[in-house]
Image (tube, helix red, strand yellow):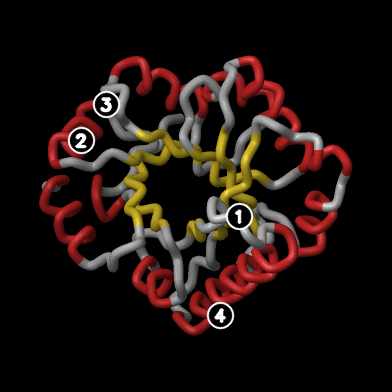
């Protein structure tokens, strides 16, 4: 598995304005160093403690992206350094991120995660739930959290039209939120969608970030 060649191949196929987040979860620091040597700087992890240990080991100009479900009790591990949290799915989590960000005297960028797949196991907000967050007094009081876009995971299926439909739905959610709550706010610009198996469709449907792991690093080694 040649990590450098894989990143070169994938990056060459991404249009301007679409960023590659290399999903390094479960991979050793050495694999990240190999990608880093090529020039990759944005890496995605799904376990806060694992991300924190890699942060301590690796170069400090790496952008760490939290892409997995995040429990409130674990925010403290990543608050000092995380660049972007992709998986915000509740007001309670936003409030916790706010508290931890304030302790670190920094603002943490976040994406609202939406449930666009038909699979019930996937997490995420409905549009109505997102509106309830946006209109809550608690949200309006937040000073150390900045919503910069949306994230979603499509159904794992061979049906490319279904995947395309789900990505299109996320783009429409983004546009509605932009119009009603983030008009005139250029920082609200990210649409994080697409993984190794479906990122080309995500690119066609208007994503700004793709989260790719196995096509770069090989199949994941799950830790038990």
Q: Secondary structure at mark 2?
A: helix
Answer with mark 1 or mark 3, whichever residue precedes in sequence: 3
Instruction: Give coordinates of residue 63: x percent, y percent.
Output: 37, 35
Answer with mark 4 or mark 1, whichever residue precedes in sequence: 4
Q: Nearer the viewer, mark 2 or mark 1?
A: 1
Instruction: Give coordinates of residue 118: x percent, y percent.
Output: 64, 69
The residue at which mark 2 appears reads as 36
Answer with mark 2 or mark 1, whichever residue precedes in sequence: 2
For mark 1, does the 10 Å Cα neighbourhood hold few (<14), some (14 to 19), or many (20 or more) residues? few
Marks 2 and 3, how far apart at CA: 10 Å
Give yes or no for contact between labels 1 and 3 (Cβ–Cβ under 8 Å).
Answer: no
Answer with mark 2 or mark 3, whichever residue precedes in sequence: 3
The residue at which mark 1 appears reads as 185
Answer with mark 4 or mark 2, whichever residue precedes in sequence: 2
Residue 34 quadrant: top left
Q: Nearer the viewer, mark 4 or mark 2?
A: 2
């Amino acid at each position: 598995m040649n990590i450098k060649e894989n990143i070169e191949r994938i990056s060459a196929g991404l249009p301007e304005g679409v960023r590659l987040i290399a999903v390094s979860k479960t991979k050793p620091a050495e694999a990240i160093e190999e990608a880093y040597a090529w020039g990759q700087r944005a890496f995605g992890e799904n376990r806060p403690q694992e991300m924190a240990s890699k942060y301590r080991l690796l170069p400090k100009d790496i952008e760490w992206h939290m892409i997995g479900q995040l429990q409130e009790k674990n925010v403290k591990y990543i608050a000092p350094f995380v660049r972007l949290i992709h998986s915000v799915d509740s007001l309670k989590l936003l409030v916790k991120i706010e508290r931890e960000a304030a302790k670190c005297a920094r603002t943490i960028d976040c994406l609202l995660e939406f449930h666009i797949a038909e699979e019930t196991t996937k997490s995420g907000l409905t549009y109505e739930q997102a509106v309830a967050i946006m209109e809550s007094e608690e949200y309006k009081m937040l000073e150390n959290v900045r919503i910069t876009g949306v994230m979603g995971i499509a159904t794992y299926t061979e049906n490319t039209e279904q995947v395309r439909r789900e990505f299109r739905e996320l783009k429409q959610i983004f546009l509605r939120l932009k119009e009603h709550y983030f008009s005139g706010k250029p920082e609200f610009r990210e649409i994080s969608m697409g993984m190794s198996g479906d990122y080309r469709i995500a690119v066609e449907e208007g994503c700004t970030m793709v989260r790719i792991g196995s096509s770069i690093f090989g199949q994941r080694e799950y830790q038990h």
